[in-house]
Amino acid sequence: MTVIVDQPEFGIEVDRKSEGLILDGGFAVPIANAFGHEFRDYEAESERQEGVEIFYKNSHINQTYDFVKRMREEYMKLDKVKMSIWECCELLNNVVDESDPDLDEPQIEHLLQTAEAIRKDYPDEDWLHLTALVHDLGKVLLLPEFGELPQWAVVGDTNPVGCAFNESIVHHKYFKENPDYNNPDYNSEFGVYEKGCGLNNVSMSWGHDDYMYLVAKENKSTLPSAGLFIIRYHSFYALHRSGAYKHLMNEEDKENLKWLEIFNKYDLYSKSKVRVDVEKVKPYYLSLIEKYFPTKLKW
């Protein structure tokens, strides 16, 4: 059957095999991803399943507390390039996320799909539209000018390091080969942290989420706290899908989590073969970039 995805003048027909579910704001959620499977099904046999599992094995083995510390120290310098947000969006045409079992389109398509779906349902929250546009820009870490990091150090679900790895994390079994797994300093419930310390004081596995958060924060973006929270934790599925690690949250985290849970519906379920007319939506997003970000940013 054919379903029309109703976006603000930008929807295009796309073939679907099943009816959609309706979210709070009216966004139609497709039951199947681009490969005909359920979303985030890491066991389904598909042309990407084996590669995705290998990706998570490498990530879980190598993402240690010390590795994260080194990466943050290196990339907090923001000495790679200077460019605008939109220039960075265009760079993502060169990136495909190997950890994603749901889509293999260039990342610029996903950014605009997410932003336009949110824009339709939350027209007055322009900061949320822009957050959707920029949330994955940190994936430029895969490109040579940003260090050409391996996929396992850029994409995929994120999780805290410095404390026990929760069993809800996808492909958890591979953490047994991580040096921190048997380290008594890092393998308890709290590890190096304290109850209610706040997620801002917790080290997350290194990748595009934390990098884009650093870029926004250090360049003094005026996005609200909830926007920065979404950028940093949108891949933290153990928290916003499974409820893990809530013992580390403070009150501000709990308020921001409400917005992340809204955002996540669009981040996950807007992945499709629907195309967005980039030139038609570009002026709107350029106006938001001007409002919330400096013209040129240090990356």
Image (cartoon, grey):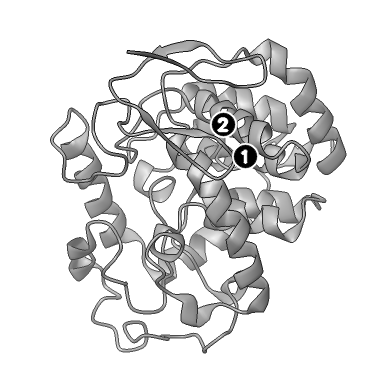
> In the rendered image of this protein, does residue 199 appear above or below residue 130?
below
Residue 62, by quadrant, is bottom left
Q: Are marks 2 and 1 in contact (CB under 8 Å)?
A: yes
- Residue 19 appears in the figure: yes
Residue topped by disc 2? 111
In front: 294, or 25?
A: 25
Q: Earlier in the sequence, mark 2 or mark 1?
A: 2
Residue 6 picture location, percent across and down: 57, 20
Task: Identify the residue shown where x is 23% and y is 63%.
Answer: 172
Task: Identify the residue shown where x is 75% and y is 27%.
Answer: 285
Residue topped by disc 1? 132
Task: Identify the residue shown where x is 51% and y is 20%.
Answer: 5
Alpha-carbon neighbours of circle 2 within 10 Å: few (<14), some, or many (≥20)? many
Residue 6 in the figure: left or right of residue 168: right
Circle 1: residue type: Ala
> In the rendered image of this protein, does residue 42 appear above or below residue 259?
above
Residue extending farthest to the left is 45
> In the rendered image of this protein, does residue 75 appear above or below residue 288?
below
